Image (spheres, helix red, strand yellow):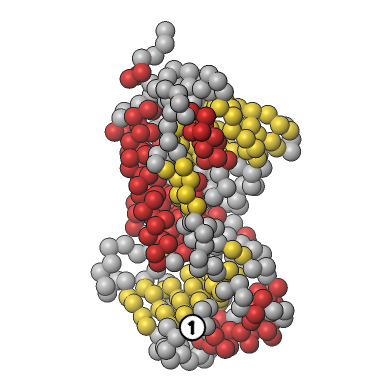
Amino acid sequence: SALKTDEISIKNTMICPTVVIGSGPAGLATALMLARQGIVGIKLFDQLSAPPKPDNISYWGNYEGERSYLIGLNGKGQRALQELGVMDRILNYSTVLNGAISWDPNSPIDKPVERDFIAMGKKYRTVCLERDRISACLLAELEEKFPDAVQIQFNVNCTEIAWQSGALCEVHLSDPERGNYSVTAGLLVGADGTNSVVRDSMLELSAASKGTKRQFPFYVRRFEDKNVRYYRTIPLYLPIEPEHKTTFHWKLNMSYSARVASEVNLEALPGGWMGPTDGLSTYLAVILFRPWDTRLTDMRTSDDARAFFAELFPAFVPCLRDADLERFAQKKDRKFPRFMFAGPSLHCGHADTNSGSSAVLVGDSAHTVKPFFGLGVNSAFEDVAALGLALNRTNGLLAPALAEYSLLRAKEARALVQLSRVFD
């Protein structure tokens, strides 16, 4: 017999599977949270290839290509990952910050400003590692502990979400081996980033619902970028051994930053654990600049790059290698995503019926900010924690859980983007 509305739980409605689109940190963390709650039949799809294993030092220690940028996990992000039981694994491949060292436009090269997080009594210490390495850790956790609950398929593109007249959600997929096919989702999780197909389908469903009993408001607010910056990355090798004579005493486990009067900034975080590194600590620096800065747009050679750093960031010159300078000079300029948030709710669908589908947004598909020090990833983990909390509070009843999640996170998504814009 049909289930009563108040009995519709995420476990007993899954005649159709839970489908997660996106295997970045948000999607993998969501799958892990659901699996830990005893949910099975979870299908996760991503258009990209699987990340290397987190202990693959030959990959993570190679900075020659366009690698994943570094993330700083803050206190809330760490707490969410602790609740997922994966934080200890992540710590195995991370660097924990003891403080921050910075130069402002007036700082002498040998006298930057230093902040000691331990002496300051900071409640948490930022944990740094590569964004894709976080995904690798989450993937390893799923494969080792929940192989029967979650099926993960890489190199599969989600092309369309179609909401059928019977309220079922068909997820259209394409991959090189199977071609085009579809799966029906009981619960659809949109963790597919700034260009979310799931979010776009919710906009379409909202428009189609107008004038019906199931009408629901949903919008996406995108903002013009009024502070446009491009960025390039370059590895830094801190000269910490005594034989390396520099004007400044470099310290490990610190973040480094430098601001200059000509609107070019440098931000650097330490990479995750790489094993022995010849006494040199490897960092990845992000150089932020204006699109019209010809010192970068006209840069062609390693000599050009070295002259650029010597002029603007002289303290960092001993940390640079010729091959990296050559690659830096020839790199393409990269852009940040535009600020965006969805609302006034982050879910839609028919979770209160025995035959309908529902969708919910987490991470960048719900709120997009510029990824300085991992702000987007940390807020994504907060989304996952909130969704898990909502499911616990409602004993797994899907309709009230999704409504609770939207109450917990929709206003937060808006506030996150608005606050980020203020400080941009």
Taking the view exactly as shown, the residue that stands out farthest to the top is 1
Residue 323 in view:
no
Decide if residue 54 is on the left or right side of residue 100. Answer: right
Residue found at x 61% / y 84%: 308
Which of 322/295 is in front?
A: 295
Q: Quadrant of the N terminus?
A: top left
Measured from the top left, where is residue 189 in percent x and y?
49, 37
Using the image, determine if residue 98 lies above or below residue 224: below
Kindly indicate the quadrant of the structure image that contains residue 163. Answer: top right
Residue found at x 38% / y 28%: 398
Measured from the top left, where is residue 408 in percent x and y?
33, 42
Residue found at x 68% / y 29%: 181
Q: Which residue is mark 1?
A: 260
Using the image, determine if residue 190 lies above or below residue 55: above
Mark 1 element type: loop
- Which amino acid type is marked by label 1? Val
